[in-house]
Amino acid sequence: MAQNIIIMKKYTLLLMLCAIVFALACSPASSGNKQLKGDWKSKDGKTKLKITGKEFILDDGAPIKEDYIVKGDTLLTSFEGNQPYTEFIIKQIDEHNLHLLFPDSVVVEFER
């Protein structure tokens, strides 16, 4: 009987830990940086960027909708969650400006 209680406590603890890990993994992508969300336009007017809680939509003639996650100062995008990820480095961000280093090493300046 006492052995069953110990086993139940271990499983309960394990389930609680799994729930915490799952909750952290499923938190919104932009929770780390709420300044990213919104509609952006490149300063030259050629590219539009929309960032929602789950999608990174780059439009330079034909919109490309991708999922994304943020790790530190890096936006990692992927089409429908597939790898490899495309990396965009956040060089500067504030309420009105976003400077992204694109994968081809070009910095694009966006504004709201």
Image: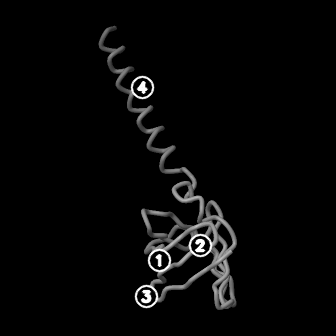
Q: Which of the labelled discs sits on residue 73, or is there none?
A: none
Q: Position of residue 23 (x, y in %)?
A: 51, 43
Q: Point out the tag, 4 or 1, that comes first from the N-terminus.
A: 4
The first of marks 4 and 3 along the sequence is 4
- Residue 12 is marked as 4
Determine which of the numbered discs, if any, sits on residue 66 in the image. Answer: 2
Q: Secondary structure at mark 4?
A: helix
Q: Nearer the viewer, residue 49 or 22?
A: 49
Q: CA distance from mark 1 to mark 2?
A: 10 Å
Q: Residue at x 35, y 25 (%)?
A: 10
Labels 1 and 2 touching (C-beta < 8 A)? yes
The secondary element bearing badge 3 is classed as loop
Residue located at (48% from left, 38% from top):
19
In the picture, the quarter occupied by the C terminus is: bottom right
Pointer 3 with pointer 2, Cβ within 8 A? no
Q: Is residue 15 above or below residue 36?
A: above
Q: What's under tag 4, amino acid-wise?
A: Thr
Residue in the image at 36% along x and 14% along y: 5
* Disc marking residue 86: 1
Disc number lying in front (4 or 3): 3
Nearer to us of marks 1 and 3 is 3
**Which amino acid type corresponds to the residue marked 2 in the rendered image?**
Glu
